[in-house]
Image (tube, helix red, strand yellow):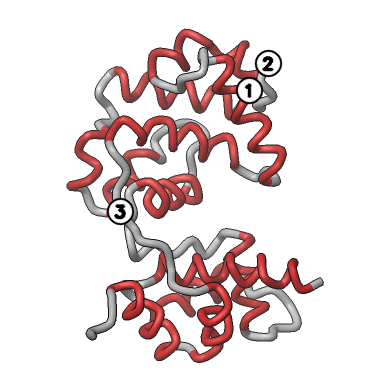
Amino acid sequence: MPPTPRQRIAATIIERDRAFRAVVTSAGLPPARRSAPVHERFPSLVRSIVFQLLATSTADTIHARVSQACGGQVSVDSILAAGAADLRGAGLSQTKADGMIDLAEQVRDGHIVLERHGRLSDEEIVREVTRVRGIGPWTAQMYLMHTLGRANVWPAGDYGVRNGWSILHGLAAMISEDDLRREGERFDGVRSDVAWYCWQAVHLARLAK
C-alpha cells in the first residue's frame, strides 16, 4: 500500500533532518490541512488577534468574553455593534480592540475580501491582512496555517517554534529568529508541519517534567 500524504510529509521531514525522528514517532503524523469555509475566516482572524502574546488559558478566557460581547457569534456586524469599549471590557488591550474594529471595517468596506483568500498566494494574503492595525506577520502566519491550511508557512519568530527547534536539536541557548529562518530553507513545501512538530516537542517536553 503506498504511503498516505501525511506519511510522506513525516518521512520527508525526517529525511531532511533526522533530529525530528523522535518527535515524529512520539507525536504521530501531522494534522490534515484543509481550508476553512469562508464564514470561519473572519472569526479566526479575531481569535488570532486575541491570542497575540498571551498564554493559552488567558487567551481562551478573553476570547470567550469577546464572543459574549458579540452576542455569542463573532462576525463583522457583531464586532462593529460591540464597539471598542465593550471589547476592552472583555479584557482586550486598546490596541487589540482597535485592531478588531479596523479589521471589521476593512472587511465591511471591501478592502479585505476573505472570499478570495483561497485563490491568493501566501505573500498576497500577508500583505492584505497586515494592513489592519495590530495584525503583524505572526497573526497572518497563524491564519495561513490554521485557517487556510497552507503547507509552507514558516513562523520563525514564534516562541514555541524556536523553543521546540532548540529542544529537538539539543541547543544550549534558544535559536534566534534569523537562524531559524535560515534553517527552514531546507524544508520547502512542508514548513507548516515542521512548525507543528516543533510545537509538539515543547508539549512533550513539558509532559516529561
Q: Which residue is pictured at 44% across the width and 72% down the height? A: 29
Mark 1 residue crowding within 10 angstroms, few (<14) / some (14–19) / many (20+): some
Residue 166: image quadrant is bottom right
- Check the image and name the residue furthest to the right: 209
Amino acid tagged 3: Arg
Dots 2 and 1: beta carbons under 8 Å? Answer: yes
Q: Which residue is pictured at 65% across the width and 45% down the height? A: 53
Amino acid tagged 1: Arg
Rendered position, 166 above or below 49: below
Q: Which residue is pictured at 32% across the width and 80% down the height? A: 8
Badge 2 element: helix
Between the C-alphas of marks 1 and 3, the distance is 28 Å
Question: Which residue position is annotated with label 1?
Answer: 65
Question: Which residue position is annotated with label 3?
Answer: 34
Q: Position of residue 1 (x, y in %)?
A: 23, 85
Q: Nearer the viewer, mark 2 or mark 1?
A: 1
Q: Which residue is pictured at 53% across the width and 11% down the height? A: 83
Image side of residue 1 versus residue 145, left or right = left
Mark 2 residue crowding within 10 angstroms, few (<14) / some (14–19) / many (20+): some
Q: Which of the two residues, 7 or 35, is positioned nearer the viewer here?
A: 7
Image side of residue 9 versus residue 53, left or right = left
Amino acid tagged 2: Gly
Between the C-alphas of marks 3 and 2, the distance is 34 Å
Question: Which residue position is annotated with label 2?
Answer: 89
